[in-house]
Image (spheres, rainbow, N blue to C red):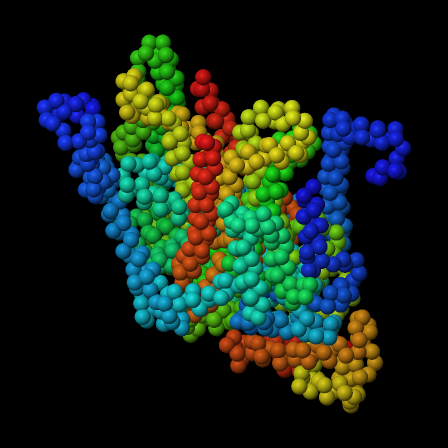
């Protein structure tokens, strides 16, 4: 039948066709490209610029993994997804790894069959509102129209929060952050709610950011992190240790500028030596070579560099480190040691 | 199959089998069946392997779990604690609501357009033509987004709502309308209304019987109208208008009380109706022009007046041509209502096929439910229209 | 009437022309000219007069404001929305002109855009011989049209010497054309096969075709697109993974093939039984009789329906935004979230509507032209 001809034609034409009986690592290396699942566009976290080049905090982690695995941080194919499609894209094998402001939850871990990587951003859900409305607390939002991205944990938190506080509201369902901005600026909704980091990025993108404010209430815990599919422990380990390496590099003062120098020869600090492979062969344990972390750090810098470049106080997003400071600086960023 | 490999008698058998029409058809069908079966088996086997690899199963138990999300427009009792199943019902009702309203409005608009297209007035005719061509040649999704954008951007905020007679308020958050509160006596009026309908149904067949046997003609339409609308209306006023209207009031962010029609519903409703009306208009025009002029002339030669010529001669014949394509337009409205998701109207695709799917991660189950629901709607509508089609076909001799 | 009159006149006055060859008199002055036309078409009866007044009132209410908004009060240049508002209070076309490249090519790499242009030129070359049967060298043109989809596929995606361009860079009008043309090119043959299958005497094939067609026609396209984007990979061998655009193309093709099959079935049913019997009597086997006798007639009858299905398919390409492909509508919506331009949704939607109107209206006009042409051939 024609149908099978189509399937055959499809398989032949498809550039990405591949067979993946082996592990994800082998697949990625054989393909020479990492498929990284990101958002369709949240400024500062992952968004294409005018030339279509992806930049952002989450994007840096994608590039770090690509650098560690393939030796080149540019060998990433970004798969933009909405809140609704992200897990199916990952589970169907279309994406290898996900870095997409995704909240780690028990049901996602167990029921959606994901393995979460360490938290790379501690967030919480907040409310963005026009200052002229004179609202100062989320408890005063009774009867408001609230724009909410469907398929996110924020949708569930919102329902819970308003239920607990006995307030009614009108949910306005939207698919992407873009639609959120469009609807909020058109005044279709009084309030836009999502993770506080996303709100900061949205507010920065608005016409007159000073006319809008984020309410003081943070109604949920949103530990955002990367994720991979269940069932490939080696691949999960690679993701886990690339994220950890980025945090540890900040602790140890290793930056994209000085990493080459540190990696040239074993130095005084055994922790740095283990991280950069000048002592021992930690990379082999996760199926990579000795210089995996060197490449990861050179690609996007350590945690602090990436944070400051994409979402830090000097960017339009203007987020402060807060909870996301190192544990030594009063934050809760605390990576397991490489040892 | 090379010829040398086979001895003469064998080839004869093969070619005989192949050239025999009966056998050949059996062979072809066995091959086709095997191929289709193999394809299905292969796909299902793949699905089982794939699901096993990531440790998922197929399980509809999630339908009883709390949905945990809120829905903007619910016609039945629904809170975030209700189950996914209830959320699905809400979605189904919302889809049916838009389908029924859409079918209603598009039929009225479509017949009007069809008649305008036949109008002798050049200007009206051309206006209808321009409207139909514009609407038909632009994607319906674009109409939906355009109208949604118009409502959201052009209508005022609740604070400066467009006030219609101090009862209805038009805002970009929706149209706030007074909602009726029925008193006890109202049910009496409703009862009269129902009796009126039953009476008219009976009266129609009675009048037909009388007309068939004696030729005496009763003005069935006017008598029915009086029974269905007139008497209940009189009763309504005699009983002292037993409906209280609850007027919406501006409280806080939005209007409270009364009922609200959300912009998403309005945009979808108007866009779908206007879009489909253009197609229906063309169908109606084609149907009426297809009834030959001779029929009208013959009818007037019998001395039947113009309006009865239309209602007894032209329209019944035109309807027979109009109904089948009209059915597929009604089906299209129902299916196109799934575009609701583009503007966040909570229909089937957005509830069970959207949020529930995503929050539970059960793609297989949810998509199966959605596909089955749409299939059954389509089958129901076409079954009904086929029945109706058959019924009016019986008049053909 | 006329003859009697002339003969009556002949009797009394000597004619200054040959009898029976009086030149035609001009029609009565009240049946020609603008005034008569107006009287006939606009003011023939009270109802007609009311319609005319209503129409004029409608035009008066709608036309001037729309024209003002669209053209006379519109801003054609400007940095952002506020710049537009500063010079004019109508439409802000500066937005469209700034994003025009994006609307046309999507994110297709700038240095490779000549490949899109070339494919478009080739498309025109391929389509002309199909549309007009008087094209010179039509035979070769048709052969070229058959291979065109593959040439275009190669040009656009790359490979074999061209730098590969991943399909997620496709966008804008180019994406619409890719999806639309592929769907049109492949759904017709598939639809013909399905229609023949549905009419077939072989019960199993018939049942399969009927259930396939009814399934496709019973569900909305976007649910099928969702299936393509979420579920399809579960049904493929583990690890196989093919391009989202390709999956969409397959779904769109299957979808419109279902509708195409019904249109062609209508054509098949309209052919008199005698034609089938005659071709059987000639000793033609199934395929030759279909190819030479039945299908040419059936397709000719179904042309309007086929073109309508094409138009429907072409319009349905906009649905791909729902699964995240950036067709012109998707580009438009994405651009609307740029706060420089936010709130200009009318401009975007009207611009995209214009594009679709031109292409779809063109198609429907062509179908009318073809219908008329084929009809005159019948009358011979």
| Residue A267 vertical position relative to residue B64 in the rendered view, above or below | below
| Residue C117 vertical position relative to residue B87 in the rendered view, above or below | below
Q: In terms of depth relative to the viewer, which is nearer, B11 or B97? A: B11
Q: Position of residue C327 (x, y in %)?
A: 52, 58
Answer left or right for C339 relative to A82. left
Residue plotted at (34% across, 30% down)? B189
Q: In terms of depth relative to the viewer, which is nearer, C38 or C145? A: C145
The image quadrant that residue C75 belongs to is: bottom left
Quarter of the image containing the C terminus of chain A?
Answer: bottom right
| Residue B47 vertical position relative to residue A320 in the rendered view, above or below | above
Residue plotted at (10% across, 26% down)? C13
Quarter of the image containing the N terminus of chain A?
Answer: top right
Q: Is residue A299 visible?
A: yes
Residue plotted at (70% across, 67% down)? A33
Answer left or right for A255 relative to C108. right
| Residue A23 vertical position relative to residue B248 in the rendered view, above or below | below
Q: Is residue B81 visible?
A: no
Q: Position of residue C258 (x, y in %)?
A: 58, 40
| Residue placed furthest toward the left | C12
């Amino acid at each position: 039948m024609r149908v099978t001809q189509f399937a055959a034609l499809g398989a032949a034409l498809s550039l990405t066709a591949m067979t993946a009986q082996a592990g994800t690592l082998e697949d990625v290396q054989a393909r020479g490209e990492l498929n990284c699942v990101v958002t369709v566009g949240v400024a500062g976290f992952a968004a294409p610029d005018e030339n279509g080049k992806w930049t952002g905090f989450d994007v840096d982690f994608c590039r770090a993994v690509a650098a560690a695995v393939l030796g080149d941080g540019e060998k990433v194919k970004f798969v933009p997804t909405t809140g609704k499609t992200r897990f199916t894209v990952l589970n169907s094998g279309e994406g290898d790894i996900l870095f997409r402001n995704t909240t780690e939850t028990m049901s996602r871990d167990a029921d959606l069959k994901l393995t979460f990587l360490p938290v790379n951003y501690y967030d919480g859900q907040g409310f963005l509102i026009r200052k002229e409305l004179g609202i100062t607390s989320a408890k005063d939002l009774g009867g408001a129209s609230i724009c909410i991205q469907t398929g996110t944990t924020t949708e569930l938190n919102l329902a819970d929060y308003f239920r607990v506080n006995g307030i009614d509201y009108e949910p306005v369902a939207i698919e992407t952050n873009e639609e959120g901005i469009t609807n909020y600026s058109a005044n279709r909704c009084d309030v836009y709610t999502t993770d506080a980091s996303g709100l900061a990025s949205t507010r920065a993108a608005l016409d007159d950011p000073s006319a809008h404010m984020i309410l003081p209430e943070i109604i949920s815990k949103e530990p955002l992190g990367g994720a991979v599919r269940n069932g490939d422990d080696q691949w999960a380990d690679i993701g886990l240790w690339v994220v950890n390496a980025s945090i540890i590099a900040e602790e140890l003062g290793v930056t994209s500028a000085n990493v080459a120098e540190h990696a040239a020869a074993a130095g005084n600090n055994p922790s740095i030596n283990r991280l950069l492979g000048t002592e021992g062969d930690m990379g082999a344990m996760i199926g990579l070579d000795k210089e995996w972390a060197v490449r990861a750090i050179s690609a996007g810098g350590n945690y602090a560099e990436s944070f400051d470049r994409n979402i830090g106080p000097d960017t339009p997003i203007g987020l402060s480190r807060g909870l996301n400071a190192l544990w030594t600086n009063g934050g809760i960023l605390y990576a397991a040691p490489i040892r | 199959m090379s010829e040398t490999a086979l001895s003469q008698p064998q080839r004869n058998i093969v070619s005989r089998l192949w050239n025999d029409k009966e056998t050949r058809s059996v062979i072809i069908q066995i091959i086709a069946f095997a191929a289709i079966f193999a394809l299905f088996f292969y796909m299902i086997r793949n699905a089982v392997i794939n699901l096993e690899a990531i440790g998922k199963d197929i399980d509809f138990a999630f339908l009883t779990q709390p949905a945990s999300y809120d829905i903007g427009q619910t016609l039945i009792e629904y809170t975030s604690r209700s189950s996914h199943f209830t959320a699905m019902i809400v979605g189904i009702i919302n889809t049916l609501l838009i389908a029924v309203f859409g079918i209603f409005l598009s039929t009225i608009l479509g017949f009007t357009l069809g008649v305008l297209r036949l109008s002798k007035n050049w200007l009206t005719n051309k206006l209808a033509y321009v409207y139909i061509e514009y609407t038909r040649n632009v994607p319906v999704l674009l109409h939906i987004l355009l109208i949604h954008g118009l409502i959201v951007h052009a209508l005022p905020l609740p604070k400066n709502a467009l006030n219609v007679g101090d009862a209805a308020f038009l805002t970009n958050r929706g149209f706030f309308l007074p909602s009726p509160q029925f008193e006890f006596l109202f049910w009496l009026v409703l009862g009269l209304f129902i009796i009126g309908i039953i009476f008219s149904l009976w009266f129609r067949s009675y009048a037909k019987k009388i007309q068939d046997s004696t030729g005496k003609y009763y003005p069935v339409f006017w008598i029915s109208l009086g029974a269905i609308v007139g008497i209940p209306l009189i009763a309504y006023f005699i009983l002292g208008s037993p409906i209280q209207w609850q007027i919406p009031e501006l409280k806080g962010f939005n209007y409270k009380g009364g009922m609200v029609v959300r912009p998403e519903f309005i945009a979808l409703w108007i866009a779908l109706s206007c879009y489909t009306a253009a197609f229906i208009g063309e169908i109606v025009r084609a149907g009426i022009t297809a009834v030959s002029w001779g029929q009208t002339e013959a009818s007037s030669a019998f001395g039947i007046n113009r309006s009865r010529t239309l209602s007894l001669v032209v329209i019944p014949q035109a309807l027979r041509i109009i109904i089948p394509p009209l059915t597929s337009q009604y089906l299209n409205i129902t299916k196109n209502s799934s575009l609701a998701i583009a503007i966040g109207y909570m229909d089937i695709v957005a509830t069970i096929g959207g949020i529930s799917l995503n929050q539970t991660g059960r793609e297989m189950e949810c998509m199966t439910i959605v596909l089955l629901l749409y299939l059954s709607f389509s089958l129901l509508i076409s079954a009904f229209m086929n029945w109706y089609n058959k019924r009016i076909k019986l008049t053909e001799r | 009437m006329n003859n009697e009159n002339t003969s009556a006149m002949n009797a009394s006055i000597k004619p200054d022309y040959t009898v029976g060859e009086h030149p035609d008199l001009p029609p009565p002055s009240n049946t020609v000219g603008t005034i008569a036309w107006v009287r006939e078409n606009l003011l023939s009866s009270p109802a007609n007069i009311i319609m005319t007044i209503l129409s004029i009132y409608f035009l008066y209410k709608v036309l001037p404001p729309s024209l003002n908004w669209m053209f006379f009060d519109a801003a054609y240049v400007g940095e952002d929305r506020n710049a537009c508002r500063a010079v004019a209070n109508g439409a802000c076309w500066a937005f469209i002109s700034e994003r025009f490249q994006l609307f046309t090519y999507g994110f297709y790499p700038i240095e490779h855009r000549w490949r899109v242009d070339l494919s478009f030129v080739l498309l025109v070359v391929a389509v002309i011989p199909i549309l007009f049967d008087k094209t010179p060298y039509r035979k070769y043109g048709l052969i070229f049209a058959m291979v065109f989809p593959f040439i275009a596929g190669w040009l656009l995606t790359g490979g074999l010497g061209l730098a590969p361009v991943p399909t997620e860079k496709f966008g804008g009008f180019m994406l619409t054309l890719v999806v639309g043309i592929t769907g049109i090119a492949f759904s017709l043959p598939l639809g013909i096969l399905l229609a023949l299958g549905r009419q077939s005497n072989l019960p199993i094939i018939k049942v399969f075709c009927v259930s396939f067609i009814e399934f496709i026609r019973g569900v909305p396209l976007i649910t099928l697109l969702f299936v393509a984007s979420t579920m399809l990979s579960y049904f493929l061998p583990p690890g196989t993974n093919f391009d989202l655009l390709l999956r969409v193309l397959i779904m769109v093709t299957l979808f419109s093939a279902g509708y195409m099959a019904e249109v062609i079935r209508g054509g098949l049913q309209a052919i008199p039984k005698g034609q089938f019997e005659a071709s059987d009597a000639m000793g033609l086997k199934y395929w030759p009789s279909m190819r030479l006798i039945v299908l040419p007639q059936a397709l000719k009858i179904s042309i309007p329906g086929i073109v309508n299905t094409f138009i429907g398919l072409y319009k349905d390409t906009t649905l791909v935004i729902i699964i995240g492909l950036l067709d012109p509508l998707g580009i438009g919506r994405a651009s609307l979230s740029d706060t420089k331009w936010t709130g200009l949704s009318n401009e975007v939607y009207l611009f995209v509507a214009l594009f679709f109107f031109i292409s779809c209206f063109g198609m429907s006009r062509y179908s009318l032209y073809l219908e008329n042409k084929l009809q005159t051939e019948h009358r011979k």
